[in-house]
Amino acid sequence: MDPEFHPISIQAGEGAWLIASDGKRYLDGNSSIWTNLHGHRHPKLDAALFDQLGRIAHSSFLGLTHEPAARLASELVSFANDPDLHPKLNRVFFSDDGSTAMEAGLKMILQGFSQAGEPLRREFISPDGAYHGDTIGAMSLGKSETFHHHFQTFLFPTRKVMAPACYRCPFNRAKPEREDARRYRKCNFECATLAEEEIHKVGHRLAAWVLEPKVQGAAGMIMHPEGYAQRTAAAARKVGARVLFDEVLTGCHRTGTALAAHSQRVMPDVVALAKGLTGGYLPLAATLTTEKVFAPFHGDPEKTFFHGHSYTANPLGCAVATANLGLLSGRDAEKQRHRIFRSLQEVSKQFWQHPNVGDVRQEGGILAIEIVRDRSTRARFPSKEKRGARICRAAQDLGLITRPVGDVLVLMPPFCTTDEEIEKMAESLFQGIRKEMPA
Ligand SMILES: *Cc1c(COP(=O)(O)O)cnc(C)c1O
């Protein structure tokens, strides 16, 4: 912890803006750490919250139920399924945040296999750099030196395969260009082949292939080449294992479709949703699964999935989440998102002007700009120089709040952001780069 660090105190919010206690206004360039979807103080979300507050804020979900949860579960089932894709995610398990949604997912997979007579399925495979949350189970599934090194001996062992990160791939023979590395890569899709081989090798001991489909967030907004999710999921199914997708970041239309899985034309057996689920209002998460995964829990009370949190299915969260799904549906909402995606694409081009920009990549509402010491070799800055953090600090003085992932800068505006506001965000970030790295 840096003793010189004095965080800005945020007092209010309004659309894409955050307002500090000293009255200064900042654009919320990363949607309040990837959660917010429609802006702050959205009248429909506020109304859903107040309306539920007029009834009850919370009651237990143990042996009781309530209408906001039942309604949300039913809405989520329609939201998460694509008519042309299988299997169907028909069962919903509520928890509080992304980490708990992942914990619940991996526990239901393990217990499910155990109760279905396959107790030897105990292994998990995920890509290098994966991030699934900060609880012990979620950490075990993830791969991060910085976050995990104090806890390594407490984490259960999992297997990792190389991340499908085209810009930094040792198999990519292409010279750097001023383009998303996925577009000019020259390789034989070795990342997918290596994952398939590892999945095949673990075979009948594999419980699940665990993936953040399309975009690995905390690994540095690694954006996957088309077909990776589909090929690896098929390999996992071939050996009888489950496919667990972590859509905590990518879900709720952040990358375009309701789930990133839809655009990849492959459904998981279990999916975790959190961050955007309440539009960035309240901590609520859901783990959705299929009838097949649910079946071994049915019947005998001893087969119950004994996992619950005090605030499971919090009614305020459920009411806001239902209103959020409502705001995400319909043609106008879709048009609005596409405007944002185009606007981000438009502003992304200017970053190539700077010689220290090595890769610019985008998936829907996520724009990532990777800073390098040398564009021609893709060499990084020493991590202790904290270039990404310094750039974002400089951009903050210019009215933009966003957080880097290492030296990867991120713009992920709420869907209510205007084109002018997006231009302003990009301009502040670009000035931040210029200030820290005068070319
Ligand atoms: C943020 C995140 C998590 C953890 O969610 P929390 O709500 O912070 O516990 C898990 N997976 C992914 C992909 C995330 O981006």
Image (cartoon, helix red, strand yellow):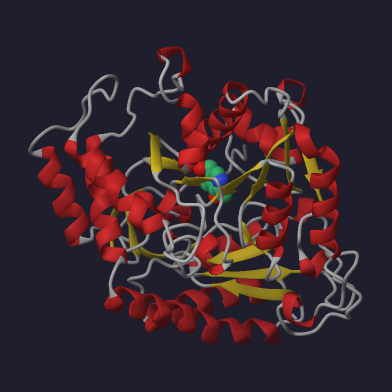
> Is 186 in front, or is 405?
186
- Residue at position x 85%, y 55% in the image: 194
Q: Furthest residue to the top?
A: 302
> Is 77 in front, or is 102?
77
Q: Furthest residue to the left?
A: 54
Q: Is residue 377 above or below residue 309?
A: below
> Is 239 in front, or is 206?
239
Q: Is residue 127 above or below residue 334?
A: above
- Residue at position x 74%, y 52% in the image: 235
Residue 395 left/right relative to 11: right
Residue 240 left/right relative to 401: right
Q: Is residue 21 visible?
A: no
State the image coordinates of residue 71 (x, y, percent, origin top left): 23, 45
Q: Is residue 369 visible?
A: yes
State the image coordinates of residue 153 (x, y, percent, origin top left): 77, 21
- Residue at position x 82%, y 68% in the image: 189
